[in-house]
Image (cartoon, helix red, strand yellow):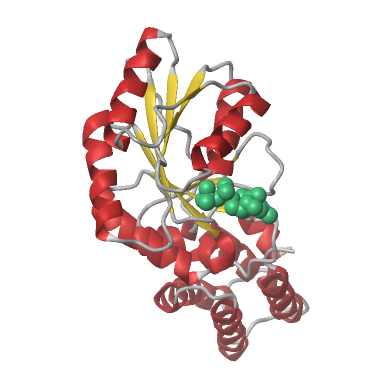
Amino acid sequence: MAFESLTNRLQNVFGKLRGKGKLSEDDVNEAMREVRLALLEADVNFKVVKDFVAKVKEQAVGVEVQKSFTPGMVVVDIVHKELIELMGGSATKIAKASKPPTVILMAGLQGAGKTTTTAKLAMMLMKGNHKPLLIAGDIYRPAAIKQLQVLGEQIKAPVFTLGNDVSPVEIARQGLQYAKANSHDYVIVDTAGRLQIDEALMEELKQIHAEVKPDEVLLVVDAMTGQEAVNVAKSFHDQLELTGVVLTKMDGDTRGGAALSVKAVTGCPIKFVSMGEKIEPLEPFHPERMASRILG
Ligand code: GDP
Protein backbone atom coordinates (compact mmCIF):
# COMPACT_ATOMS: atom_id res chain seq x y z
CA MET A 1 0.00 0.00 0.00
CA ALA A 2 1.20 3.52 -0.81
CA PHE A 3 2.76 5.47 2.07
CA GLU A 4 2.46 2.47 4.38
CA SER A 5 5.77 2.86 6.12
CA LEU A 6 5.48 6.66 6.35
CA THR A 7 1.99 6.37 7.83
CA ASN A 8 3.13 3.83 10.40
CA ARG A 9 6.06 5.94 11.47
CA LEU A 10 4.05 9.14 11.74
CA GLN A 11 1.34 7.38 13.71
CA ASN A 12 3.99 6.24 16.12
CA VAL A 13 5.34 9.75 16.61
CA PHE A 14 1.91 11.27 17.05
CA GLY A 15 0.69 8.48 19.27
CA LYS A 16 3.36 9.47 21.76
CA LEU A 17 2.47 13.16 21.48
CA ARG A 18 -1.26 12.66 21.78
CA GLY A 19 -0.92 11.03 25.16
CA LYS A 20 0.74 14.03 26.71
CA GLY A 21 -1.21 16.61 28.67
CA LYS A 22 1.61 19.09 28.32
CA LEU A 23 4.36 19.44 25.75
CA SER A 24 7.87 20.50 26.56
CA GLU A 25 10.22 21.95 24.00
CA ASP A 26 12.12 18.65 24.15
CA ASP A 27 8.95 16.75 23.27
CA VAL A 28 8.44 18.92 20.21
CA ASN A 29 12.09 18.62 19.17
CA GLU A 30 12.06 14.86 19.57
CA ALA A 31 8.84 14.54 17.55
CA MET A 32 10.19 16.76 14.79
CA ARG A 33 13.40 14.74 14.62
CA GLU A 34 11.32 11.62 14.07
CA VAL A 35 9.09 13.31 11.48
CA ARG A 36 12.23 14.38 9.64
CA LEU A 37 13.60 10.84 9.58
CA ALA A 38 10.26 9.40 8.51
CA LEU A 39 10.03 11.81 5.58
CA LEU A 40 13.62 11.18 4.51
CA GLU A 41 12.99 7.46 4.61
CA ALA A 42 9.90 7.96 2.46
CA ASP A 43 12.29 9.40 -0.14
CA VAL A 44 11.09 12.98 0.17
CA ASN A 45 13.53 15.52 -1.22
CA PHE A 46 16.00 16.51 1.46
CA LYS A 47 15.54 20.27 1.16
CA VAL A 48 11.77 19.85 1.15
CA VAL A 49 12.04 17.90 4.42
CA LYS A 50 14.22 20.56 5.98
CA ASP A 51 11.84 23.39 5.10
CA PHE A 52 8.80 21.36 6.12
CA VAL A 53 10.15 20.52 9.56
CA ALA A 54 11.27 24.11 10.12
CA LYS A 55 7.77 25.38 9.32
CA VAL A 56 6.04 22.88 11.57
CA LYS A 57 8.46 23.49 14.41
CA GLU A 58 7.99 27.24 14.24
CA GLN A 59 4.27 26.80 14.81
CA ALA A 60 4.54 23.88 17.22
CA VAL A 61 6.84 25.67 19.63
CA GLY A 62 3.99 28.00 20.56
CA VAL A 63 1.76 25.04 21.38
CA GLU A 64 3.64 24.07 24.53
CA VAL A 65 2.70 27.33 26.14
CA GLN A 66 -0.88 27.31 24.90
CA LYS A 67 -3.56 26.32 27.34
CA SER A 68 -4.72 23.53 25.08
CA PHE A 69 -5.84 20.33 26.81
CA THR A 70 -4.60 18.35 23.84
CA PRO A 71 -1.34 19.92 22.69
CA GLY A 72 -0.37 16.74 20.85
CA MET A 73 -3.47 17.00 18.68
CA VAL A 74 -2.63 20.60 17.90
CA VAL A 75 0.77 19.52 16.59
CA VAL A 76 -0.84 16.81 14.45
CA ASP A 77 -3.15 19.45 13.00
CA ILE A 78 -0.19 21.65 12.14
CA VAL A 79 1.51 18.75 10.35
CA HIS A 80 -1.73 17.95 8.52
CA LYS A 81 -2.13 21.54 7.37
CA GLU A 82 1.50 21.78 6.22
CA LEU A 83 1.26 18.46 4.33
CA ILE A 84 -1.71 19.85 2.40
CA GLU A 85 0.23 23.03 1.66
CA LEU A 86 3.25 20.99 0.55
CA MET A 87 1.13 19.15 -2.01
CA GLY A 88 -0.29 22.33 -3.50
CA GLY A 89 -3.17 23.33 -1.23
CA SER A 90 -6.38 22.66 -3.09
CA ALA A 91 -7.24 20.47 -6.05
CA THR A 92 -6.92 22.10 -9.46
CA LYS A 93 -9.22 21.66 -12.44
CA ILE A 94 -8.34 20.76 -15.98
CA ALA A 95 -7.97 23.83 -18.23
CA LYS A 96 -10.76 24.91 -20.51
CA ALA A 97 -9.96 27.08 -23.52
CA SER A 98 -12.20 30.10 -24.07
CA LYS A 99 -12.53 28.90 -27.64
CA PRO A 100 -12.65 25.11 -28.10
CA PRO A 101 -10.94 22.81 -28.57
CA THR A 102 -8.93 22.80 -25.37
CA VAL A 103 -5.57 21.28 -26.23
CA ILE A 104 -3.78 18.96 -23.81
CA LEU A 105 -0.22 17.89 -24.52
CA MET A 106 0.92 14.68 -22.84
CA ALA A 107 4.60 14.03 -22.13
CA GLY A 108 6.53 11.40 -20.23
CA LEU A 109 9.23 8.80 -20.29
CA GLN A 110 8.50 5.35 -21.67
CA GLY A 111 6.77 3.06 -19.24
CA ALA A 112 5.56 5.88 -16.97
CA GLY A 113 1.97 5.16 -18.00
CA LYS A 114 1.42 7.94 -20.52
CA THR A 115 -0.73 6.00 -22.96
CA THR A 116 -2.85 4.48 -20.20
CA THR A 117 -3.25 7.92 -18.61
CA THR A 118 -4.22 9.47 -21.94
CA ALA A 119 -7.11 7.01 -22.21
CA LYS A 120 -8.10 7.57 -18.57
CA LEU A 121 -8.07 11.32 -19.10
CA ALA A 122 -10.29 10.94 -22.18
CA MET A 123 -12.67 8.84 -20.11
CA MET A 124 -12.80 11.46 -17.40
CA LEU A 125 -13.64 14.11 -20.01
CA MET A 126 -16.30 11.91 -21.60
CA LYS A 127 -17.87 11.40 -18.21
CA GLY A 128 -18.19 15.19 -18.07
CA ASN A 129 -19.99 15.12 -21.45
CA HIS A 130 -17.00 16.30 -23.45
CA LYS A 131 -15.98 14.97 -26.82
CA PRO A 132 -12.23 14.40 -26.81
CA LEU A 133 -10.09 13.48 -29.80
CA LEU A 134 -6.91 11.51 -29.16
CA ILE A 135 -3.99 12.30 -31.44
CA ALA A 136 -1.41 9.55 -31.91
CA GLY A 137 1.88 11.44 -31.94
CA ASP A 138 4.23 8.70 -30.75
CA ILE A 139 5.58 7.47 -34.07
CA TYR A 140 8.75 5.87 -32.70
CA ARG A 141 7.63 3.02 -30.49
CA PRO A 142 6.32 0.44 -32.97
CA ALA A 143 3.19 -0.50 -31.02
CA ALA A 144 2.34 2.93 -29.62
CA ILE A 145 -0.22 3.91 -32.25
CA LYS A 146 -1.89 0.51 -32.11
CA GLN A 147 -2.01 0.64 -28.31
CA LEU A 148 -3.75 4.01 -28.41
CA GLN A 149 -6.19 2.77 -31.06
CA VAL A 150 -7.08 -0.28 -28.99
CA LEU A 151 -7.68 1.90 -25.93
CA GLY A 152 -9.65 4.38 -28.03
CA GLU A 153 -11.92 1.59 -29.24
CA GLN A 154 -12.34 0.30 -25.73
CA ILE A 155 -13.51 3.64 -24.36
CA LYS A 156 -15.19 4.74 -27.60
CA ALA A 157 -13.02 7.79 -28.19
CA PRO A 158 -11.77 8.47 -31.73
CA VAL A 159 -8.02 8.35 -32.38
CA PHE A 160 -6.44 10.50 -35.07
CA THR A 161 -3.37 8.95 -36.72
CA LEU A 162 -1.32 9.46 -39.86
CA GLY A 163 0.82 6.39 -39.25
CA ASN A 164 4.55 6.37 -38.52
CA ASP A 165 5.89 8.19 -41.54
CA VAL A 166 4.58 11.69 -40.92
CA SER A 167 6.31 13.96 -38.40
CA PRO A 168 4.60 14.34 -35.01
CA VAL A 169 4.38 18.09 -35.54
CA GLU A 170 2.44 17.57 -38.77
CA ILE A 171 0.24 14.91 -37.15
CA ALA A 172 -0.56 17.31 -34.32
CA ARG A 173 -1.33 20.13 -36.78
CA GLN A 174 -3.67 18.03 -38.90
CA GLY A 175 -5.22 16.41 -35.85
CA LEU A 176 -6.12 19.79 -34.46
CA GLN A 177 -7.72 20.78 -37.77
CA TYR A 178 -9.69 17.55 -37.76
CA ALA A 179 -10.87 18.24 -34.21
CA LYS A 180 -12.09 21.70 -35.16
CA ALA A 181 -13.88 20.39 -38.23
CA ASN A 182 -15.57 17.66 -36.19
CA SER A 183 -16.53 19.73 -33.16
CA HIS A 184 -14.31 18.02 -30.62
CA ASP A 185 -14.03 20.25 -27.58
CA TYR A 186 -10.89 18.57 -26.21
CA VAL A 187 -7.80 17.30 -27.97
CA ILE A 188 -5.26 15.09 -26.23
CA VAL A 189 -1.93 14.86 -28.01
CA ASP A 190 0.07 11.76 -27.15
CA THR A 191 3.79 12.26 -27.72
CA ALA A 192 6.87 10.07 -27.87
CA GLY A 193 7.93 8.47 -24.63
CA ARG A 194 11.64 7.73 -24.54
CA LEU A 195 13.81 5.85 -22.17
CA GLN A 196 15.47 8.98 -20.89
CA ILE A 197 15.29 12.70 -21.37
CA ASP A 198 17.17 13.62 -24.52
CA GLU A 199 17.54 16.78 -26.51
CA ALA A 200 15.82 15.48 -29.61
CA LEU A 201 12.75 14.56 -27.53
CA MET A 202 12.66 18.00 -25.93
CA GLU A 203 13.13 19.74 -29.26
CA GLU A 204 10.31 17.79 -30.82
CA LEU A 205 8.03 18.51 -27.87
CA LYS A 206 8.81 22.20 -28.11
CA GLN A 207 7.92 22.13 -31.80
CA ILE A 208 4.62 20.38 -31.14
CA HIS A 209 4.00 22.87 -28.33
CA ALA A 210 4.61 25.81 -30.70
CA GLU A 211 2.30 24.24 -33.28
CA VAL A 212 -0.72 23.38 -31.13
CA LYS A 213 -0.31 26.00 -28.34
CA PRO A 214 -1.64 23.73 -25.60
CA ASP A 215 -3.81 24.95 -22.75
CA GLU A 216 -2.50 22.15 -20.59
CA VAL A 217 0.89 20.41 -20.64
CA LEU A 218 0.78 17.31 -18.47
CA LEU A 219 3.80 15.26 -17.56
CA VAL A 220 3.12 11.67 -16.62
CA VAL A 221 5.54 10.27 -14.04
CA ASP A 222 5.72 6.95 -12.22
CA ALA A 223 5.28 7.50 -8.48
CA MET A 224 7.20 4.30 -7.79
CA THR A 225 10.40 5.94 -9.03
CA GLY A 226 10.43 8.49 -6.18
CA GLN A 227 13.02 11.24 -6.51
CA GLU A 228 13.78 10.16 -10.05
CA ALA A 229 10.23 11.17 -10.97
CA VAL A 230 10.82 14.53 -9.33
CA ASN A 231 14.05 15.06 -11.28
CA VAL A 232 12.31 14.18 -14.53
CA ALA A 233 9.53 16.64 -13.69
CA LYS A 234 12.07 19.35 -12.96
CA SER A 235 13.91 18.85 -16.28
CA PHE A 236 10.68 18.90 -18.27
CA HIS A 237 9.33 21.90 -16.42
CA ASP A 238 12.55 23.88 -16.94
CA GLN A 239 12.28 23.39 -20.67
CA LEU A 240 8.60 23.15 -21.42
CA GLU A 241 6.63 24.90 -18.70
CA LEU A 242 4.37 22.13 -17.58
CA THR A 243 0.94 23.04 -16.26
CA GLY A 244 0.61 19.86 -14.23
CA VAL A 245 1.99 16.47 -13.28
CA VAL A 246 0.12 13.16 -13.32
CA LEU A 247 1.40 10.65 -10.78
CA THR A 248 0.79 7.10 -11.92
CA LYS A 249 0.95 3.77 -10.11
CA MET A 250 -0.34 5.27 -6.89
CA ASP A 251 -2.02 1.90 -6.33
CA GLY A 252 1.44 0.44 -5.77
CA ASP A 253 3.52 0.63 -2.62
CA THR A 254 5.21 3.95 -3.37
CA ARG A 255 6.93 5.38 -0.33
CA GLY A 256 5.54 8.83 -1.01
CA GLY A 257 8.60 10.85 -2.02
CA ALA A 258 7.29 11.94 -5.41
CA ALA A 259 3.85 12.96 -4.17
CA LEU A 260 5.38 15.02 -1.39
CA SER A 261 8.22 16.63 -3.35
CA VAL A 262 6.98 17.43 -6.87
CA LYS A 263 5.20 20.69 -6.10
CA ALA A 264 7.87 22.10 -3.81
CA VAL A 265 10.78 21.18 -6.10
CA THR A 266 9.26 22.09 -9.45
CA GLY A 267 6.60 24.65 -8.58
CA CYS A 268 4.26 22.61 -10.74
CA PRO A 269 1.18 21.03 -9.11
CA ILE A 270 0.15 17.39 -9.25
CA LYS A 271 -3.20 17.52 -11.02
CA PHE A 272 -4.17 13.88 -11.33
CA VAL A 273 -3.33 10.46 -9.97
CA SER A 274 -3.62 7.12 -11.70
CA MET A 275 -4.50 4.19 -9.49
CA GLY A 276 -4.30 1.06 -11.58
CA GLU A 277 -3.89 -0.64 -14.92
CA LYS A 278 -7.61 -0.85 -15.54
CA ILE A 279 -8.92 1.91 -17.79
CA GLU A 280 -11.27 4.03 -15.73
CA PRO A 281 -11.70 7.81 -15.41
CA LEU A 282 -8.61 9.62 -14.18
CA GLU A 283 -8.89 10.98 -10.65
CA PRO A 284 -8.15 14.59 -9.69
CA PHE A 285 -5.42 14.91 -7.09
CA HIS A 286 -6.79 16.15 -3.77
CA PRO A 287 -3.97 17.33 -1.48
CA GLU A 288 -6.19 17.31 1.60
CA ARG A 289 -7.35 13.72 1.03
CA MET A 290 -3.79 12.62 0.37
CA ALA A 291 -2.60 14.32 3.56
CA SER A 292 -5.29 12.54 5.58
CA ARG A 293 -4.33 9.26 3.98
CA ILE A 294 -0.67 9.80 4.83
CA LEU A 295 -1.51 10.52 8.45
CA GLY A 296 -3.66 7.38 8.50
P1 GDP B 1 3.83 4.58 -21.58
O1 GDP B 1 5.02 3.88 -22.14
O2 GDP B 1 4.23 5.74 -20.73
O3 GDP B 1 2.79 4.95 -22.59
O4 GDP B 1 3.18 3.57 -20.54
P2 GDP B 1 1.89 2.63 -20.64
O5 GDP B 1 0.65 3.44 -20.57
O6 GDP B 1 2.05 1.70 -21.78
O7 GDP B 1 2.03 1.86 -19.25
C1 GDP B 1 3.16 1.08 -18.92
C2 GDP B 1 2.73 -0.02 -17.96
O8 GDP B 1 2.32 0.55 -16.73
C3 GDP B 1 1.54 -0.82 -18.48
O9 GDP B 1 1.72 -2.16 -18.11
C4 GDP B 1 0.35 -0.20 -17.73
O10 GDP B 1 -0.70 -1.12 -17.57
C5 GDP B 1 0.99 0.15 -16.41
N1 GDP B 1 0.31 1.26 -15.72
C6 GDP B 1 -0.04 2.47 -16.21
N2 GDP B 1 -0.64 3.22 -15.27
C7 GDP B 1 -0.70 2.46 -14.15
C8 GDP B 1 -1.20 2.68 -12.80
O11 GDP B 1 -1.72 3.73 -12.43
N3 GDP B 1 -1.04 1.64 -11.94
C9 GDP B 1 -0.44 0.47 -12.29
N4 GDP B 1 -0.33 -0.47 -11.37
N5 GDP B 1 0.04 0.24 -13.50
C10 GDP B 1 -0.09 1.23 -14.43
Residue in the picture at 50% in, 72% down: 56
Image quadrant in which the N terminus is located: bottom right
Residue 149 placement, left or right of 269 = right
**Front one among 44 and 146:** 146
Q: Which quadrant is home to the C terminus?
A: bottom right
Q: Nearer the viewer, residue 249 or 68?
A: 249
| Total numbered labels | 0
Residue pushed farthest front? Answer: 165
Nearer to the camera, 11 or 6: 6
Question: In screen coordinates, is 25 left or right of 209?
Answer: right
User: Going by the image, does 41 lie left or right of 253?
Assistant: left
Residue 292 occupies quadrant: bottom right
Q: Position of residue 24 (x, y in %)?
A: 61, 87
Question: Which residue lies at the image location 51% right of the left edge and 78% below the top edge?
Answer: 61
Q: Quadrant of residue 148?
A: top right
Give the image location of residue 278, x and y in percent.
71, 42
Could you tell me which residue is drawn at 57 percent across and 84 percent down?
Answer: 37
Residue 117 visible, this angle: yes
Using the image as rendered, state which of residue 83 and residue 239 is in the foreground. Answer: 239
- Give the x, y percent position of residue 103: 37, 28
In the rendered image, is residue 98 in sight? no
Whether 61 is drawn above or below 184: the answer is below
The location of residue 73, given as percent across then percent down, is 69, 67
User: Which residue is rendered at x = 53% and y = 17% of the image?
Assistant: 130
Query: Is 11 left or right of 214, judged from the image as shown?
Result: right
